[in-house]
Image (cartoon, helix red, strand yellow):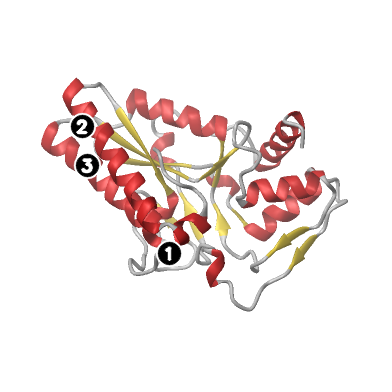
Amino acid sequence: GAAPTQSKFFVEHPVETIRTSIYGTEAMLELGRRKKVKKVVYLSSMEQYGVPYESGQVMTEDRLGYLDHLNVRSSYSESKRLCECYCKSYAVEYGVSAVIARLAQTFGPGVPVSDNRVFMQFTKSALKHENIVLHTKGDSMSNYCYIIDALTGILALMKAGEAGEAYNICHDEETRSIASIAQLVATHVSNNKSKVVFDIPEDVQGFGYAPTVHMFLSSKKLKSLGWKPKVSMAQAYVRLAEYIQEEGL
């Protein structure tokens, strides 16, 4: 599962982004082949779906969207796709029981407080009663999973996931826009002492932001294995805020 996770890094270091994913995955699959391990779970990402061909499309594991492979930010998404193909190939050719976990945005206690992704930025701003500043319109729909739910999903795949198959891990009943999430954090973490403010630069290309996507992941396939998410988005952000305070923000 080793891979960079910050968009700016994908843009500034696309070669390292690809190398980390490909070489790391190959090493683990080779280890699985040599040791004849019972199960390998590869941590993929919802970003491998790209941009749905139809806005608002429900993305089940058999669907795929568009990726511009000549955009350096695609170094992350494309390498995830190739690693998934690697897992399938090892399963078919060598009998390695590799299962693919397509994780939605996953967060919660344990994530470094220095992390600069939006969930951490929003929460830290709310704790300080500062405005939550968005540099885009926040239209993208975010598919998320609280870390405990993600871990139980991975355990479910270790137990019952089928070799060479992919499974979405997400709380599909809590799909929200980035702007809606920002407002949720302002409400539940700062008790409305923070406001959501839009400050959109004229040129956002250099920031490495993902393209605006309206995508709804489905976790029906994983739920068929007996898994079910339990933590709502509001609960998740309150718990994240408690963790940040414990870490001494």
In the structure shown, which secondary structural element does the residue marked by tag 2 occupy?
A: helix
> Mark 3 or mark 2: which is in front?
2
Q: Tell which residue pokes out farthest to the right in this image.
A: 193
Which amino acid is tagged 2?
A: Glu
Q: Is residue 75 visible?
A: yes
Q: Secondary structure at mark 3?
A: helix
User: In the rendering, which numbered label is found on residue 51?
Assistant: 1
Tell which tag, 2 or 1, sits nearer the viewer: 2
Q: Residues within 10 Å of mark 3 (few under 14, many from 20)?
A: many
Which corner quadrant of the image does residue 156 belong to?
Answer: top left
Compared across the picture, whether 51 is left or right of 78 comes to right
Give, as a three-letter code, the residue at label 1: Val
- Kindly identify which residue carries mark 2: 30
Quick check: can you spot residue 165? no
Where's residue 32, x and y in %?
A: 23, 27
Where 158 sits versus 79, above or below? above
What is the spatial separation of the Cα atoms under label 2 and label 1, in whole angstroms?
A: 32 Å
Q: Position of residue 53 (x, y in %)?
A: 39, 68
